[in-house]
Structure formats: C-alpha cells, structure tokens
Image (tube, rainbow, N blue to C red):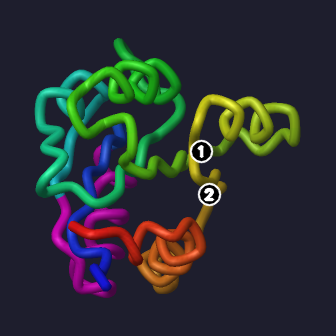
Amino acid sequence: MADLKHILLAEDEPDLRELVRISLAVVGGLEVTVCEDGGQALAAFDSIRHDLVVLDVTMPGIDGPETLARLRRLPGGERVPVVFLTARQQPEDNRAFLAMGALHVIGKPFDPMTLANQLRVLWEQAGVAGEDA
C-alpha cells in the first residue's frame, strides 16, 4: 500500500504558504512542492512525484478552480486527488468545489498541527493509498 508522501501546494499569500509548508513538511513529515499560484502549480505538476494537490481557491491569475480544470487535462492529472484550501465556507461553494472534482474542502483558518494528518485521512478514505504507484 502506497503512503501519502509528496504534496503540491499552490497558495498566493506568502505567510499562509509558509505556514502550510511548515505544517505539512516539518510537523507532518511530508515532501512539499510550494507554488505561489496556479500557473506555477501546473508547470510543477509531475504525476509520478505528486500524490496530492492542495490549492487555494482565490489566487491571482489562474485561481484554484481553473487550476483544477487545467490539471485534469495534464497526463496523470485526471486522477490526482485535489483538496481546496479556502476562507470561502458557504455550503453552496463547497458543493460547487466538490462537483468540480475536488476530494475535499478545508476551511481557513485550519489547525496547522493536524493538517497533514487530515490530508492522510482524506487520502486513505478516497482509496488512493490502495492503488498501485
């Protein structure tokens, strides 16, 4: 069974980007590729290396939903789990994000001490951990 090892993160806010990186890498022991926006995330995506993608919803240029749509057209991007990280916590927004193909929506603020474990649980619940790498 494969373990969650490497996350691709796109977050435009520098302080929050660093907080998420620390939460996942230092606290959670995961490898993290950090991107400032959706364009960088698309350029950095590698289906062999990235197990899961975490996208901020609201970013300048290519926002999270558009990044997800474009990611789905990349080789391997059609199957990589994507989690949105957002301050937008309206039920209709969350339903729309899930309908776009997101695995889950995590609200801001989040608990940096538990974020990595939360992503691991989502990964396992989605059945990704049982797939052949």
Tell whether position 130 is magenta.
no
Query: Which residue sits furthest top?
Result: 61
Query: Relative to 80, does residue 115 appear above or below in the rendering?
Result: below
Give the magenta-colored segment's residue range.
14-32
Residue 106 circle label:
2
Between residue 76 and residue 24, name the one nearer to us: 76
Q: Quadrant of residue 1?
A: bottom left
Which three-letter amino acid code belongs to the residue tagged 2? Ile
Q: Answer left or right for 28 relative to 50.
A: right
- Disc 1 crowd rating (10 Å Cα; few below 14, some 14-19, many 20+) is many
The CA span between labels 2 and 1 is 6 Å
For mark 2, give the secondary structure.
strand
Callout 2: 10 Å neighbours few (<14), some, many (20+)? Answer: some
Q: Where is residue 10? Give x, y as percent.
A: 32, 41
Q: Main secondary structure of the magenta part?
A: helix
Q: Residue 34 location in percent, x, y?
A: 19, 50
The three-letter code of the residue at mark 1 reads Thr
CB-based contact (under 8 Å), mark 2 and mark 1: yes
Q: Residue at x 16, y 54 (%)?
A: 33
91 or 3, which is in the foreground?
Answer: 3
Q: Is residue 20 magenta?
A: yes
Per the image, the residue denoted by label 1 is 86
